[in-house]
Image (spheres, coloured by chain):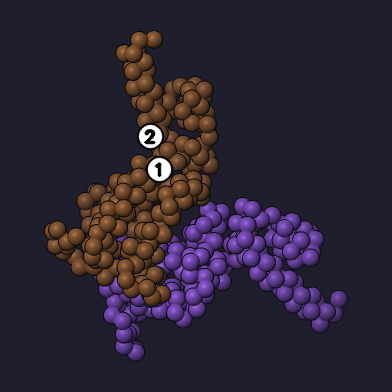
Chain colours: A purple, B brown
Amino acid sequence: MTAEAASATSRGQEGTRARLLATALRLFSEHGVEGTSLQMIADALGVTKAAVYYHFKTKDEITEAVAEPGLRELDQIVTEAAAMRRPGARIDHLLAGFVDVVVRYRSLVALVSRDPGVMRALTRSWSGRENFSVRMTEILTGPDGGVSRAVAVHAAIAGIALTGGAHDFAGIEDDKLRESLLEVGRKLLGRPRKVRSGAA
Amino acid sequence: MTAEAASATSRGQEGTRARLLATALRLFSEHGVEGTSLQMIADALGVTKAAVYYHFKTKDEITEAVAEPGLRELDQIVTEAAAMRRPGARIDHLLAGFVDVVVRYRSLVALVSRDPGVMRALTRSWSGRENFSVRMTEILTGPDGGVSRAVAVHAAIAGIALTGGAHDFAGIEDDKLRESLLEVGRKLLGRPRKVRSGAA
C-alpha cells in the first residue's frame, strides 16, 4: 500500500469511527445503553458487526469513547481553573465551562442521568483522571468548607447536569439554557452575575 | 378461627409485611433492585419464598410498596400547598415538606437516583397520582412562567433529591442536612430565609 493509500484508509477509518460514535449516541438515547446491541449499531450504520468490532470490542468501550470528548474538555477546564489565583475566578471559570459542556453535550448528559450503564462507564473514565470529580468539587467549594457549602456545591453540579439533560428542556436554545443554568450555579455558589473581565 | 386469633394473625401478617419492606429497602440499597431477588428477601427474613409471595407477587410491587409512604406524604403536602392562598406560602410549604420527605427517606431517595428499576416503579405510582410531579412543578414555579424559572425549579427538585440521597452526605445529621437543602431550595426559588408564622 502506498503512503497515500494508507493515509486515505486511515482517514476512512476515522470517519467510520466518528459515524459509529454519533450513531451509538443516537441509539443509546433512543433505547438506552442496555437496550442497544453492537448488532443494532452495525445495522444502523449499514456495516457488518465485524466492522464495529474493528473499532470497539465492547459496548462499554463505545460508551467511554462517546463520552471522551466532553470529559476531556471538562478536564481541561478544571486544570485551567485550578491554575487561577483567586478562588472566585476559579469558581467562575469552572462553572461557566461546566455549564457549557453540559449544554453542548446534553443528549449525552441526558443519557448519564437515565442509564446506570453510562454512569458505570464514565466512572471508570473519570477515575482514570486523577479524581476528576474531587478536583471539581474542591474548586467549586472554595475556601469555605462547611456542610452547607458542600451541599450547595453538590446540588449545583447535580442540578445543572440533570436539568441540562432533562427532556423538558430539549427544545430550549443553547444560549438560553446556558444562561439559565449559569444562574442556577451562581445562586447556589454565591457568585455575582457580572464577572469582571481579567478576573483571574 | 376465633376473631381474636384472626386478629392476631392479621397483626402478624402486618408485621411480616413491614419487616419485608424494611428488609427489601436494605437489600435494594446494598445490591440495587436489579441485583435483589425475591429469594434473597425471603432468605434475609428467614421465611420461605411462598411467604413473600403471599404479600407481593413481583419485585415491582415491593418497590412500589417501599416508596408508598413517602409518596403519600408528598402527595398530602402538595395538596396542602395547593390550598394556600399566597404563591409564596405555597412554595414555602411545598419546599419544606419536600426537603423533609427527602431527608427522612434518604436511603430510598439514594436508590431512586442510582437505579432505573426504582424510577420505573415510582413513575407508575406517580402517574396514578394525577400528574403529581406536574402539580409540584406548577406550585414551585408560581406566577412567573419564564424559562429561567422553569430551569431553577427543575434544578431545585433534582439538586435537593440527588444531594439528599448522596452517599457523601449519609453521615450528616437530619437537621443539618434539612437546613442545608432548604437553603438550596430558597436560593433557587428566591424565597426568604425566615418564613413568617401563619404565612398562609
Residue B19, quarter of picture: top left
Check the residue under mark 1 and report the chain it is in.
B
Question: Which mark is drawn over residue B76?
Answer: none
Q: Name the residue under label 1.
A: B67
Identify which residue is drawn at 33% across, 17% down: B8
Identify which residue is drawn at 41% across, 74% down: B147
- Residue B113 on image: x %, y %: 44, 52
Q: Name the residue under label 2.
A: B22
**Left or right: A112 with respect to A192?**
right
Question: Could you tell me the amino acid type at mark 1?
Answer: Ala
Residue B162 against residue B42 in the figure, above or below? below
Residue lying farthest to the top in this orientation: B1
Q: Is mark 2 on a helix, strand or loop?
A: helix
- Residue B49 on image: x %, y %: 51, 24
Please identify, in this view, whether the residue under mark 1 or under mark 2 is nearer the observer: 1
Identify which residue is drawn at 40% across, 28% down: B17
Q: What element carries label 1?
A: helix
Give the mark nearest the N terminus, 1 or 2.
Answer: 2
Q: Is residue A138 visible?
A: no
- The front one of B8 and B188 is B8
Quadrant for the C terminus of chain B in the image: bottom left
- Residue B162 on image: x %, y %: 38, 56
Check the residue under mark 2 and report the chain it is in.
B
**Left or right: A185 with respect to B131?**
left
Question: Could you tell me the amino acid type at mark 2?
Answer: Ala
Mark 1, residues whose alpha carbon is within 10 Å: few (<14), some, or many (≥20)?
many
Mark 2, residues whose alpha carbon is within 10 Å: few (<14), some, or many (≥20)?
some
Q: Do the residues labelled 1 and 2 touch (CB within 8 Å)?
A: no
Quadrant for the N terminus of chain B in the image: top left
| Separation (CA) of disc 1 from disc 2 | 11 Å
- Residue A12 on image: x %, y %: 76, 75
